[in-house]
Image: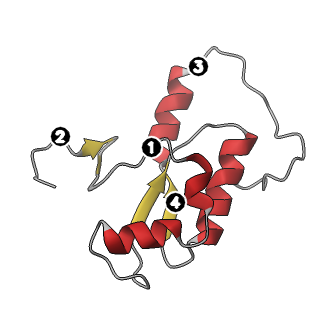
C-alpha cells in the first residue's frame, strides 16, 4: 500500500482492511491463507491482524473463534476503535453482561 497517510486508522498504520467477512474469518486457516496469498506472508509466518466487529456476545465469540482458527497469526482486538465506539456511545444504555453465553469474562 502506498504510504499517503490515509492508511492510518485510530492511530494505527493499516496495510489491508477486511470487512463484512463474518464467520468466513473463523474458518480454519482462512486468515493465514489470506496473509500468505494476498499480503505476501508465509503460511506459518505470524502476520499482525486487528479485529473490529460488533461489540455484542456474537461479535466477541467470532473474534475468539477466528483467533483459534488461525493460530499462526497475531490477532488482537482493534482496541482503539472499540474505545472510540464506547466513547461515542456515552449516555446510551448498554448491556452490562454477556448473559453467560460462551463469552470469556476477560475480553
Q: Nearer the viewer, mark 1 or mark 2?
A: 1
Q: Earlier in the sequence, mark 2 or mark 4?
A: 2
Residue behind mark 1: 19
Q: Residue furthest right?
A: 100
Q: Secondary structure at mark 1?
A: loop
Instruction: Specify few, some or many for label 1: CA neighbours under 10 Å numbering under 14, 14-19, or 20 or more.
Output: few
User: Taking 43 as reference, is 77 left or right?
Assistant: right
| Rendered location of residue 63, percent (x, y) | 62, 55
Label 1 vs 2, first from the N-terminus:
2
Residue named by callout 3? 90
Image side of residue 58 versus residue 3, left or right: right
**For the residue carrying disc 2, how many other residues have a C-alpha within 10 Å: few (<14), some (14-19), or many (20+)?**
few
Which numbered disc, 1 or 4, marks the residue that appears first in the sequence?
A: 1
Query: Residues under labels 4 and 3: Cα distance?
Result: 24 Å
Q: Check the image and name the residue furthest to the top.
A: 91
Tell me whether circle 1 and circle 3 mark residues in contact (CB < 8 Å): no
Residue appearing at x 45%, y 39% in the figure: 81
Element at label 4: strand
- Residue at the spot of label 4: 76
Mark-to-mark CA distance, 1 and 2: 17 Å
Instruction: Using the image, determine if residue 61 lies above or below residue 38.
Output: above
Amino acid at each position: 500500500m502506498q504510504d499517503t497517510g490515509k492508511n492510518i486508522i485510530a492511530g494505527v498504520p493499516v496495510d489491508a482492511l477486511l470487512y463484512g467477512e463474518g464467520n468466513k474469518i473463523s474458518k480454519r486457516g482462512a486468515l493465514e491463507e489470506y496473509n500468505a496469498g494476498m499480503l505476501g506472508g508465509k503460511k506459518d509466518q505470524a502476520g499482525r491482524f486487528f479485529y473490529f466487529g460488533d461489540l455484542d456476545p456474537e461479535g466477541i465469540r467470532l473474534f475468539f473463534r477466528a483467533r483459534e482458527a488461525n493460530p499462526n497469526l497475531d490477532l488482537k482486538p482493534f482496541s482503539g476503535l472499540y474505545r472510540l465506539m464506547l466513547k461515542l456511545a456515552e449516555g446510551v444504555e448498554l448491556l452490562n453482561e454477556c448473559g453467560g453465553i460462551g463469552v470469556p469474562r476477560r475480553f
